[in-house]
Each structure stands twice: as C-alpha cells, then as structure tokens.
Image: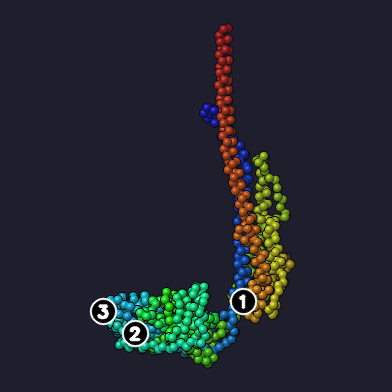
Amino acid sequence: MPSFTVPGLSSGQNTNDIVKKLVEVEAKPIKRWERENEYTRIQVRAWNELKNKAVDLQIKTKNLTSFTAPFSSKKITANEEGYISGEAGKNAKVAKQEVEIVQLATKHKVAGTKIKMRTKIPEGNFTIVSKEKRATISFQGGEIEQLVDKIKLAGGQVAIPSLTRVDSENYIFSLTATQFGKEAELKFLDPNGVLASAGLVGENQPEPPPTLKPIEFTPDAPVPYLPEKFTNNGNPENSISRGPNGYVIKPNSAFQFMIQKTPVEKFSSLEINIEPDAEGNLPDFLGCGVVYDSKEGEKVKYSSIEKKDNKYLLNVYDFAKNENLLRIIIANTTEKEITFLGANLQVPGEITGAPPQQVVTQAQDAIFKIDGIEIIRDTNENIRDAIEGASINLLKPTPNPITLEVVADVTKGINMVREFVESYNELIKYSRDVSATNRDSKIDLSSPTNQKPEADISEEYWLNKSKSGILAGEPTIVRLISSLRAVIGASYPSSTEPRFKVLSDIGVSTGNPGSSWKEIQEGYLTLNETQLQSVLIEYPESVRELFASDTNGDNRADDGVGIAILETLKPYTQFTSGIITTKVKLHETQIQENNKKIKEFESHLANYERKLKQRFEYMEQGIGKNKVINNYLNQSIRQMRANNNNDY
C-alpha cells in the first residue's frame, strides 16, 4: 500500500485529470447503453402511442357496428318551441301531426287551516290514499313537526307533507300527491282525528266495508304444486280429499285449484277461507298463491301469509293489476290437516273519508289532441302510447295547434362516421410517420463490442436515424397499414336494398374527385357529408349493413367493413398477448438488460479508477525517491569536488 502522496507533486503532471480522461475513455460503453436506452424508451412511447390510436379506431368502429348505432335515429321537432318535447325511436314513422295541448296534468294539493305552533296532536292511526297507493300510519302523538316527519317517513310514497309558517304563532299544514292525474286525488281516513287536529281535514266518514265476490271454481280436480318440495304430493289420492265443507289437505301438501277467469279489480285482495279446527283455531301462517295471466304469459305468485283477524289476505292488486286470476294455490305447511273452504275477491268500497279543509290545486289529467283526436293521460311526461315509436313530454298548453314532426336524425350518424374517418386517418398518418425511412441517408452501422469498448456508434448514425421515423422500416407497421387499406377498399355483401357494398357508396373514399395519384396513394379517407346525409335519411339500414351485417342468421354481426377492421386490429391491440404489447415488452427487457450492464460496468469503472490512482501514486512515489537519490548523489559529487580542490 503506497504512503500518502500529493498527486503531481513529484512528476509535475495533473494525474487526477489524466485518470479522469482515462476513465472517460473506458466509460464509452456506458454512454452507448444509455443512449440506446434513451432511444429505446422513445420507441416504447411510439409503440404505445400507436396502440392508443389503434384502440381509438377500434372504439370508433365498434360504435358503428353496434346494434345501437344511431343510423336509424329519429327526432321530434315542433314549429313552436316551449310547448312539447320528446324523443323518437328508430321505429317511429316519419310524419307531421297537428298537436293541441288543452290542459296539463296536475298533482292534487290540499291544505288545512291555521294551527298554533305548539299544538299537541293526539295519538292514533290515519290513512292516506292516492290512486293505487295507500299508506296507513300510526302516530304516537306529539307536535305538528313530528307529524310531518312521520308522514315523510311512512307515507312519502303517497304524499309529500309541508309546513308553512304564516305568522309568528301559526302554521298551515299541506300535502301534495306524489302522482299526477285525477285518479291520484288525495283521500283521507282519519278515525282518531289525528289529521283533523292538525287542521288538515274535517269530519271523518268511516271506510265502507269491502265487497266480497265469491271465486268460482271449475270442476277440474286439483293439481299438485311443487311435488319436489311438498313430498306428500307424490300420491294425491292420499294427500287431498273432498270433505263435506271443502277440500281436506294433508300436512306437507300443496295443490292448485282451477277457477274461472277472475279479473283483478282496483285495490282488491284474495281472501282465503280455512275451516277452524275442533278447538276453533286457525294456523298462524298459510301457504297461498295464485297463477295469473300477463302479457308475458302465465306467472306465479306464492308466499306465506300471516293470519290477521282470523283471515288470510293476499293483495293481488299489487302484482296482478288489470290481469286475470287463473288458479289458486293452497299449501299446508302445518302438522295437521286443513280444510280449504273456498275464496273471495275482496274489493274495497269507495272511500269518502275526511274532506280536506281547502284544495290548493285540483287533481286533473292532461288533455291534448293529435290531429283533432282527444287524448287523456294522467301524466305530462314520457307519454309513449300517443305517437307510435315516440315518447312526448307536455310542457304547457298551446294557444293554437302546433305542428309536430318526426324526422330522421342523421346528426349522430354523421358524427360517428366522421369520428371514424378522423381516427382512421390519424392512425395511418402516425404509422407512416414513425415507420418512414430516409433512403438518402448513409447510416454507419459500426457497433462497439465489450471486447472493444473504445469503439462507439458514430454521431452520424444517430443524426441519420433522426431523419427517419423512430420505428423506421418496422414490418409490423407496414403490415398493419397494408391490411387496413385492403379492408377499407374491399367489397362487402348486403341484403338490404339499395345494396351499399363499398364505402364510396356512402361518401367515404380515399380521395375526392380530381385528387392526384400521390394523394390517393397516401391512403387517407375523405368524407362527403352531403352524400352521407342523403343516404342516412333514405337508406339507414343499408348503411348499417355496410358496417356490420349478419350473413348466417344467428343475430350476430359477422361481416361488413366495420367487422373486418375490428378483426384486423384485434391482434395488435390485445392487452396481454397483442403484437404491440409484445414489442413493448421486448424493448423494456432490452432496457433492463442495458441497465444491468451499466450497473456491472460502473463497478468495473470504480475498480479501474482505483487501480489507476494507485499506479499513479506508485509512480509519484518512485519519482519522489529518485529525486531524493539524485539530490543526494549531486550533493555528494559536489562535496567530493570541493574536497579535491582543497587538496591542491
């Protein structure tokens, strides 16, 4: 180990600078790997950008091939704004109609008289009815604010309460129906005077008793219901029998009883009659259900019903409104026999109830005319059955009839095709730019090796590379461009007249009339929006089939220019195993390998620098020793000469 030496003191040379320059020469491979990494990172960004543009084209193309693509869109327009709005589906017929709005549907609103702020409201039950909705509320007593909160919580689906402070001491309590229309008029049952104490209603009229309409059974024998669940159903002869008063049903058995078609009336419930046992008791729960008719065919509703007031009631109006009952299901889930006596349809009587103290807004239906035909609806919004294929919203009455027109809405279709064309052109342009090659440049292909680290890629090499695309000559991109151009220029089958087989039939082409051959060779698409608008108005289905068609009748699009583009892009855009993803992974692996080489070579450089400094220290020490010896010899010689002169 050399002793401490000041660099350059003996030799007179700046050895630190010499070591630094030697290390810089030795470090050339690191610079090369770092530059390669920089260039490779740029390539990764270029591949990712290429993938982004390919995915964007994929998304724009999928929009055109979707069954919801708006090629057949319609829209509703009126010659005067502010009276009516709406949306038209693709099945709506293009037509003009005269519309007159006579009156709008309103929500019933009632209010009470003034009530002192600290008025105590008594405990009790009350019921609010509006159309088919009914809320029975139990109030524990308290102040008016507590009553309002209770109604919001338990009756908010029927009416919205509000409290208005009219002066320093008084409130006025009001209720607004949640539904529009005359039938949604609010009615109140207030047997305990709760609402009357709040000033909202007058004297209560009791609810009339319901009307019982006997269900007529057919002579057909009962049919087992869910034999896999009710095990005694396997032998109906042993699980059900006809008794003197009705059908005797054994435990763990269930049967369907055939009835005459029975319409479900407003607010009606099905009342099941079961004979009490010898002790006069009835089961706490009864398995009960119905089979009813609907637009989708027969449906079944089955549930376990709790006994109330020695009755079993199934509210059929909740799920079978305006439908017909076809069969009744009775299940014995107890451990004793039960006797099914029959059933009634329980229809509530017309409610008079407690009249409101004042009516703020009358409940009324919307009345409007289409081409002179009067139409009445209980809503102003989303009226779907007045104009075929369209829904309309009534905004305010019209002083005079207005013209309502259903027209083809080609704006969305044009925008989607325009976005498709723009996305395609961006992908083509970017692909050309990044893969372009400067054929006039002379690229120095010399490459350093680990055995000859002093060699380096020349500056000319990187300069010439910068004149070409970052992915110059990449065959993957060349294949992508050529495949897309082939797909765009191909002809596709069509079954809808007129048959649009190529994109130019709808105004999308690779060049406008008069374009030069060079422009056409670029492969960019142009869009003639006037031509596209014309074909979308007249033949929207033909346009749809050009982009996506079902050639084998399996309700899946399998041909068309859009489908072909998606199939072309799929190998490139797949997330894990796509071509571009694989390219990016290879480049990232190369960067990792170079980083590993750099790290290893930096360790070599540190050792190399240490050895150089060590050797220069030895050199300095040697030079220093030589100088000392030289000085000693020179001094000795001078001394000897001096002594010799003294002898003479």
**Can the viewer see residue 508 in this picture?**
no
Q: Earlier in the sequence, mark 1 or mark 2?
A: 1
Observer-side mark, 2 or 3, equals: 2
As drawn, 100 above or below 37: below
As drawn, 430 above or below 283: above
As drawn, 634 above or below 222: above
Type of amino acid at the residue the image marks with label 1 = Phe
In the foreground, 558 or 280: 280
Q: Residues within 10 Å of mark 3 (few under 14, many from 20)?
A: some
Residue drawn at x 59%, y 33% is 612
Residue 119: which disc? 3
Contact check, label 3 and label 1, Cβ < 8 Å: no
Type of amino acid at the residue the image marks with label 3 = Thr
Residue drawn at x 54%, y 81% is 297
Residue lying furthest top: 648
Type of amino acid at the residue the image marks with label 2 = Leu
Observer-side mark, 3 or 1, equals: 3
Q: Residues within 10 Å of mark 1 (few under 14, many from 20)?
A: many
Q: Separation of disc 1 and disc 2 at Cα?
A: 55 Å
Q: Separation of disc 3 and disc 1 at Cα?
A: 64 Å
In the foreground, 290 or 490: 290
Residue lying furthest bottom: 372
Residue lying furthest right: 517
Residue drawn at x 33%, y 78% is 138
Residue 189: which disc? 2
- Please tell me whether mark 3 sits on a helix, a strand or a loop: loop
In the foreground, 63 or 549: 549
Provide the residue designation for mark 1. Answer: 71
**Can the viewer see residue 127 in this picture?**
yes
- Please tell me whether mark 2 sits on a helix, a strand or a loop: strand
